[in-house]
Amino acid sequence: MKTVFITGTSTGIGEAAVRLFAQHGWNVAATLRHPADANFQDLPTVRTYALDVTDEAAVNRVVQQAHQDFGSLDVVVNNAGYGLVGPFETATTKQIQQQFATNVFGVFSVTRAALPFLREQKSGVILNITSVGGRTGFPMNSLYHATKFGLDGFSESLWYELAPFGIQVKVVAPGGVATDFATRSLQMTLDPADAANSYAGQVRSVLEAFRSRSGNHSTAAEIAEVIYAAATDGTPQLRYIAGPDAQALLKTKAELPEQDFMNLIRQNFGLA
Ligand SMILES: NC(=O)c1ccc[n+]([C@@H]2O[C@H](COP(=O)([O-])OP(=O)(O)OC[C@H]3O[C@@H](n4cnc5c(N)ncnc54)[C@H](OP(=O)(O)O)[C@@H]3O)[C@@H](O)[C@H]2O)c1
């Protein structure tokens, strides 16, 4: 029986991935900050572990513990993450550090903790959840994009480095997904109610544009299907662009001259 280790499984994509892998008969190490929030009692092959991915010592401990409990570790899904939205200039150092600690350094820690096991067995998959925002930038999301573009480049380079050990590196890049991402998990660098701020108009336009698109979002279950397929297809494919919105957007980006594409994005977000 194979084992998958997933971070950030309290809600959304992580929770849906836990359910799907378990339904396919996998052992699942479901990690989350507050295990009391877990809702996997109906899934006997799932074990939950308390894990904040920004705590490197805890990451090392929990990866070891999960490997010991299940006797194997085959797939790692680096899913935990959140969005920091708003002007770069008004972000605090603490917000920036927390964004990178979670979305980037958390992935580094989990990956480094898992690699000795995967190298030893000469197989495994490291699967990083990035975003369409790891391949193209939207206004007012500079810091989130910095993390997801960073993960995308990290993953592409690691793909070469780990191939000789039989380890596949994969990226699943969703477009919009109906989860807690845009509500509970979202942090702002500027209070949208702060109308006097020079960036207030841009913030309003961008938030409104994101809101107006929420009807087209994929479900977390649909993204989990892409994750499961990527983890099990046995191919060396690096990137999986998940969701019709993400696929259409990146196709447009590939086809248009850069300036035309950027003008289109500016228009779509209601910016002058
Ligand atoms: N939803 C979208 O539109 C979308 C689009 C593209 C990419 N993504 C990516 O998909 C991933 C999952 O997001 P989601 O959409 O499923 O949103 P979500 O429902 O808000 O889930 C985010 C998960 O990350 C966890 N998390 C946050 N900080 C953490 C930390 N320090 N340690 C451990 N876990 C932490 C949250 O745990 P708590 O419950 O403890 O807060 C939660 O379980 C993220 O990496 C996100 O960037 C989402």
Image (tube, helix red, strand yellow):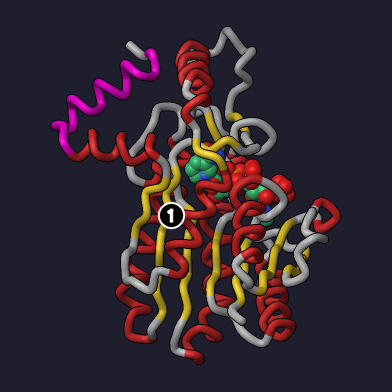
Is 80 rendered above or below residue 122?
above
Q: Main secondary structure of the magenta part?
A: helix
Q: Is residue 236 left or right of residue 54?
A: left
Please tell me in which quadrant of the rendered image residue 167 appears.
bottom left
Please name the residue shown 54% across and 13% down the image.
Answer: 197
Q: Is residue 253 magenta?
A: no
Please name the residue shown 85% across and 55% down the image.
Answer: 36
Q: Is residue 6 left or right of residue 230?
A: right
Position of the C terminus by quadrant: top left
Please name the residue shown 63% across and 72% down the image.
Answer: 25
Residue type indicated by callout 1 = Val
Q: Is residue 268 magenta?
A: yes
Range of residues picked out in magenta = 255-270
Is 271 rendered above or below residue 135?
above
Point out residue 83 in the picture as x, y percentages from the top left corner: 56, 39
Please tell me in which quadrant of the rendered image residue 249 appears.
top left
Position of the N terminus by quadrant: bottom right
